[in-house]
């Protein structure tokens, strides 16, 4: 069963670009993660301190395994000081729609 996450991270004032850059580095790492179908970093002018990440995985186990990939923990540790508050997130189950087949789901 597919597994997804919508994550929202709010940066310390003036650090959104640095936060986004770290999350884009995470996206690069996820290119090699077995089971990662989608990892997209998003910003919005409506919330200039926030960065969202949209993730879709083959299953929750694949997501959990990605946390032990080389470089991931170091990147998490480097990102934490950029956050103004704890990350927010919503877990979801993708069930269909345009584009999902293109992910190889």
Image (cartoon, rainbow, N blue to C red):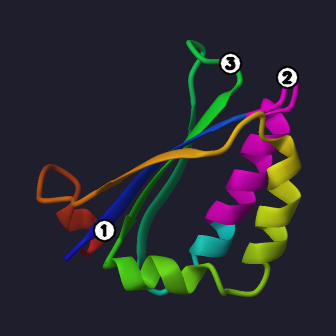
> Quick check: 29 above or below 62?
above
Q: Earlier in the sequence, mark 3 or mark 2?
A: 2
Residue that badge 3 annotates: 48
Residue 13 is tagged as: 2
User: Could you tell which of marks 1 and 3 lies nearer the N-terminus?
Assistant: 1
Structural crowding at the residue carrying mark 2, measured as other residues with C-alpha within 10 Å and reported as few (<14), some (14–19) or many (≥20): few
Disc 1 element: strand
Q: Is residue 79 left or right of residue 50?
A: right
Q: Position of residue 8 (x, y in %)?
A: 55, 40
Q: Position of residue 100 (x, y in %)?
A: 21, 60
Residue lying at 67% horizontally and 73% vertically, measured from the top left: 29
Question: Are there few (<14), some (14-19), or many (20+) residues within 10 Å of tag 1?
Answer: many
Measured in 3D between alpha carbons, the distance from the residue under mark 2 to the one under mark 1, in whole angstroms, is 32 Å
| Image position of 10 with respect to 76: above or below | above
Q: Which mark is residue 3?
A: 1
- Asked if the magenta segment contains residue 13, the reply would be yes
**Local crowd size for mark 3, using a 10 Å CA cut-off: few (<14), some (14–19), many (≥20):** some
Query: Residue 104 sits in which quadrant?
Result: bottom left
Residue 102 is left or right of residue 49, and the answer is left
| Secondary element at image label 2 | loop
Q: Tell me: 12 left or right of 52.
A: right
């Amino acid at each position: 069963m597919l597994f997804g996450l919508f994550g929202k991270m709010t940066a310390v004032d003036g650090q959104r670009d640095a936060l986004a850059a770290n999350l884009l580095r995470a996206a690069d790492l996820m290119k090699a993660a077995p089971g990662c179908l989608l990892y997209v970093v998003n910003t919005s002018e409506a919330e200039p301190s926030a960065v969202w990440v949209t993730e879709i995985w083959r299953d929750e186990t694949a997501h959990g395994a990605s946390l032990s990939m080389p470089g991931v923990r170091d990147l998490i540790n480097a990102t934490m000081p950029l956050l103004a508050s704890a990350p927010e997130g919503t877990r979801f189950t993708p069930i269909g729609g345009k584009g999902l087949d293109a992910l190889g789901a």
